[in-house]
Image (spheres, coloured by chain):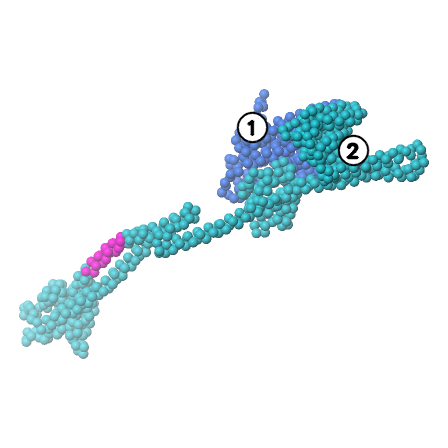
């Protein structure tokens, strides 16, 4: 590909050569033709002189006879031409450039068309003898011939007829033309040089502006500059203007796109749902903030394989399904330790064969569902058991046991116990709903909890002793957290009662308390078998049983810990379950310091 | 991974090996979690579902093996690619073994589901969660060429061993006191043993990663031949 300089050079070179060639042709045609015509008329003029001279002139004689060769020689000398004289048979009888002895060896007239034509005219009286032939060029000379007739001198010479031919060299003309060609060649060479110089100069001037335009346009493309300067009003200047308009248009479009993208990102960024867009190769194209948080990854590189983010097999199975069906969903565990339960809905993008996955964190929903499901199952179980017992015993009594004084009262007592149990459950449930609804606002005031702890431990000492357990408390007198006295007493009673119930006989239960910063903690500890970590979250739910078979035998309603939790929360506190070392567990109640 | 091959197909094949490994690791991790969950919650159904996952892991192993073999035969990889492929071949084996061990735990979970627990489950779930993160981190380290993370995995093996020793001692104590617990105790012991073996496999994975990154063999360090 030629650069701009090359193109300019070739163009001006072709131009120069065309002009030179045309000049050559015109000069050669015109001047050459003119010179030849001039020479031709010169030849015929000399021929006329020769003819006249032969016909009427006086001629040198030798031995009394006319010496034709000498005549030709003197004619040739006088006319500065090659003069040849033929007799009427066409034989050369005189020549200005040959000796008489050579004449016989010269060719016959028939080989020379002008001589032959003149010989014919010699006998053609109609056209006049004097007519000359047209000059013929041959062997670098121009020849013309004409017949002559010489009346004989009185008595001396006979009547003679013949043909005279005059030849003039064309060498002068050729020389002139050769010189002209040589001169033109020189001019052409000079032309090439000038073309080089001119094209160089022209391209330098033209391309300087163009090259700077190209460079600046390059800078415009890479963002090195914002606008081109318009240096001239010519085409290049308007090109620069077009570039500037293009750049403006581009900037507007980019700004528009950026606004669009910002809006899109703002929407995506503030969505609660995690959104991930994948390309056809299952690489991440886009992931919003919620996705990063949900998947617990610090950042996503565009183009990162999605397996790097979500490793759950259910997700790997979801992708082929969505590609086949267009839409699919799956529930999967995500996060570093797979702790979050996520509902992933995926849809295929028809245009790119990519996939968009929207993930919703359903951990809490699933947990609440489990709580509700278990609650319904548990509450019906808790209520049905005493009712079944009452029904069975009542039936037995009706079937005749009523009149049995020995066993009758036993059945009645069983009905009584179940009724009491039902009553306890119902009143616990009522308590719970009352605490929950906040119907009776608690009176929070600084309270010396040592008294409460003492009272609770004292009242439950009997139960503990019945199971040969050691129950003690060690609460300092100066701890006065903000709390409601009745509520705290119920909390401690429930916790200590539980501890006594579920710690094996001979175990130990103790209550302790300490201030920690802004808060006071009260611990109810035991050295029993402890509670598995997996129950910790749920043990405060209503009717939740760690070991369903066992705890119901103990006569609990399954609501004690739930009441504890709600009471603690009603007093701006919390309750948690911890492991005790080496065995056992600690129920820890946190209250605000007074 | 910053690879830059001119050949897009080759690049895609290496990427496929990488993806397969991560996916396989994901399945194996889930199997460990589910197996132990089934054990603790006495969920026979979950245990059976976990066992049903094993063929998928095996399939994944075969597929990855085949892919690696194809790359070896057709591309003749060199230097880091060669190390990557040969280690991937070893890794799938380790992962597959971990999957098998998870199946074993699931079987134990089915056996133990009908029995009363010996004591509250505490150490075994803790061990399982450590092993699970070890597997994940080892594979993570592999795909990210992160030898520091791999080193951390190797160090965590000691933690698993410690829990294991503790569990064994505790179970021995329980079984010596009450012969009726021996049956269940043996099952729990084997579960702990399976987990401990999983940790060893995860350590293997991590050691290979260190080799991949540093080109230094850290296997059997500190163990002399005598």
| Residue A533 visible, this orientation | no
Q: In this figure, which residue is indicated by the disc labeled 1?
A: B218
Distance, label 2 to label 1, CA atoms, is 58 Å
Q: In this figure, which residue is indicated by the disc labeled 2?
A: A556
Q: Indicate which disc residue B90 carries.
A: none
Q: Nearer the viewer, residue A552 or A532?
A: A552
| Chain coloured cyan here | A
* Numbered range of the magenta stretch: A176-194
Q: Are marks 2 and 1 on the same chain?
A: no
Residue B206 location, quadrant: top right
- A189 in the magenta segment: yes
Rendering coords of residue A79 (x, y %): 11, 66
Relative side of B105 to A310, left or right: right
Q: Are marks 2 and 1 in contact (CB under 8 Å)?
A: no
Identity of the residue drawn at 16% across and 69% down? A44
Q: Is the magenta stretch mostly helix, strand or loop?
A: helix
* Vertical comparison of A207 with A384: above or below: below
Residue at disc 2, secondary structure:
loop
Relative side of A410 to A184, left or right: right
């Amino acid at each position: 590909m030629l650069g701009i300089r090359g193109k300019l050079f070739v163009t001006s070179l072709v131009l120069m050569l065309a002009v030179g060639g045309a000049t050559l042709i015109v000069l050669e045609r015109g001047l050459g033709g003119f010179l030849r015509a001039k020479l031709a008329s010169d030849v015929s003029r000399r021929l006329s002189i020769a003819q006249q001279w032969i016909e009427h002139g006086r001629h040198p004689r030798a031995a009394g006879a006319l010496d034709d060769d000498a005549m030709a020689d003197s004619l040739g000398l006088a006319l500065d031409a090659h003069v040849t004289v033929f007799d009427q048979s066409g034989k050369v009888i005189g020549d200005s450039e040959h000796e008489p002895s050579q004449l016989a060896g010269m060719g016959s007239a028939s080989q020379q068309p002008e001589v032959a034509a003149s010989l014919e005219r010699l006998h053609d009286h109609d056209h006049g003898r004097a007519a000359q032939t047209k000059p013929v060029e041959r062997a670098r000379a121009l020849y013309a011939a004409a017949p002559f007739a010489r009346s004989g001198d009185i008595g001396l010479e006979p009547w003679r007829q013949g043909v005279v031919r005059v030849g003039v060299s064309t060498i002068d003309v050729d020389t002139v033309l050769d010189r002209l060609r040589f001169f033109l060649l020189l001019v052409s060479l000079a032309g090439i040089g000038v073309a080089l110089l001119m094209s160089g100069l022209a391209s330098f001037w033209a391309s300087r502006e163009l090259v700077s335009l190209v460079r600046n346009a390059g800078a415009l493309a890479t963002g090195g500059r914002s606008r081109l300067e318009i240096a001239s009003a010519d085409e290049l200047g308007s090109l620069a203007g077009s570039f500037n308009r293009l750049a403006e248009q581009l900037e507007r479009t980019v700004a528009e796109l950026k606004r669009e993208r910002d809006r899109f990102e703002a929407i995506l960024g503030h969505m609660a749902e995690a959104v991930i867009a994948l390309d056809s190769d299952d690489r991440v194209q886009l992931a919003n903030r919620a996705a990063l948080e949900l998947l617990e990854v610090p950042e996503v590189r565009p183009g990162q394989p999605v397996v790097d983010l979500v490793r759950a097999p259910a997700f790997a199975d979801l992708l082929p399904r969505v590609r086949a069906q267009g839409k699919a969903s799956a529930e999967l565990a995500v996060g570093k330790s797979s702790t979050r339960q996520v509902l992933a809905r995926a849809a295929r993008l028809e245009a790119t064969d990519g996939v968009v996955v929207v993930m919703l964190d359903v951990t809490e929903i699933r947990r609440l569902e489990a709580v509700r499901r278990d609650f319904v199952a548990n509450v019906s179980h808790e209520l049905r058991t005493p009712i079944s017992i009452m029904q069975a015993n009542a039936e037995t009594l009706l079937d005749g046991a009523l009149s049995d004084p020995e066993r009758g009262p036993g059945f009645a007592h069983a009905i009584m116990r179940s009724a009491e149990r039902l009553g306890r459950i119902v009143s616990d449930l009522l308590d719970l709903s009352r605490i929950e609804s906040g119907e009776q606002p608690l009176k929070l005031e600084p309270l010396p909890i040592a008294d409460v702890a003492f009272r609770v431990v004292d009242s439950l000492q009997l139960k503990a002793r019945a199971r040969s357990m050691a129950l003690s408390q060690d609460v300092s007198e100066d701890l006065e957290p903000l709390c409601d006295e009745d509520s705290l007493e119920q909390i401690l009673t429930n916790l200590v009662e539980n501890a006594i119930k579920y710690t094996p006989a001979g175990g130990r239960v103790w209550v302790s308390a300490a201030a920690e910063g802004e808060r006071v903690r009260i611990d109810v500890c035991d050295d029993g078998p402890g509670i598995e970590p997996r129950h910790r979250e749920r043990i405060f739910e209503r009717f939740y049983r760690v070991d369903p078979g066992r705890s119901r035998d103990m006569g609990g309603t399954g609501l004690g810990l739930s009441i504890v939790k709600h009471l603690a929360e009603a007093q701006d506190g919390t309750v948690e379950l911890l492991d005790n070392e080496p065995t056992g567990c600690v129920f820890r109640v946190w209250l605000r310091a007074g | 991974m910053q690879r830059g091959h001119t050949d897009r197909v080759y690049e895609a094949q290496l990427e496929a090996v990488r993806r397969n490994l991560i996916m396989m690791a994901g399945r194996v991790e889930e199997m460990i979690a589910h197996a132990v969950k089934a054990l603790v919650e006495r969920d026979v159904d979950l245990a059976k579902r976990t066992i049903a996952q094993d063929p998928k892991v095996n399939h994944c192993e075969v597929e990855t093996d085949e892919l690696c073999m194809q790359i070896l035969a057709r591309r003749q990889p060199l230097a880091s690619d060669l190390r990557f492929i040969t280690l991937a071949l070893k890794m799938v084996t380790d992962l597959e073994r971990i999957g098998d061990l998870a199946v074993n735990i699931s079987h134990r979970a089915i056996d133990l589901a009908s029995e009363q627990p010996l004591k509250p489950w505490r150490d075994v779930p803790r061990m399982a969660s450590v092993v699970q993160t070890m597997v994940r981190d080892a594979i993570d380290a592999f795909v990210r060429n992160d030898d520091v993370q791999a080193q951390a995995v190797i160090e965590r093996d000691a933690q698993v061993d410690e829990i294991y020793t503790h569990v064994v001692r505790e179970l021995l104590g329980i079984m010596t006191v009450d012969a009726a617990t021996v049956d269940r105790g043996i099952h729990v012991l084997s579960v702990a043993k399976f987990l401990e073996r999983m940790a060893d496999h995860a350590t293997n994975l991590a050691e290979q990663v260190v080799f991949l990154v540093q080109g230094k063999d850290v296997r059997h360090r500190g163990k002399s031949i005598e």
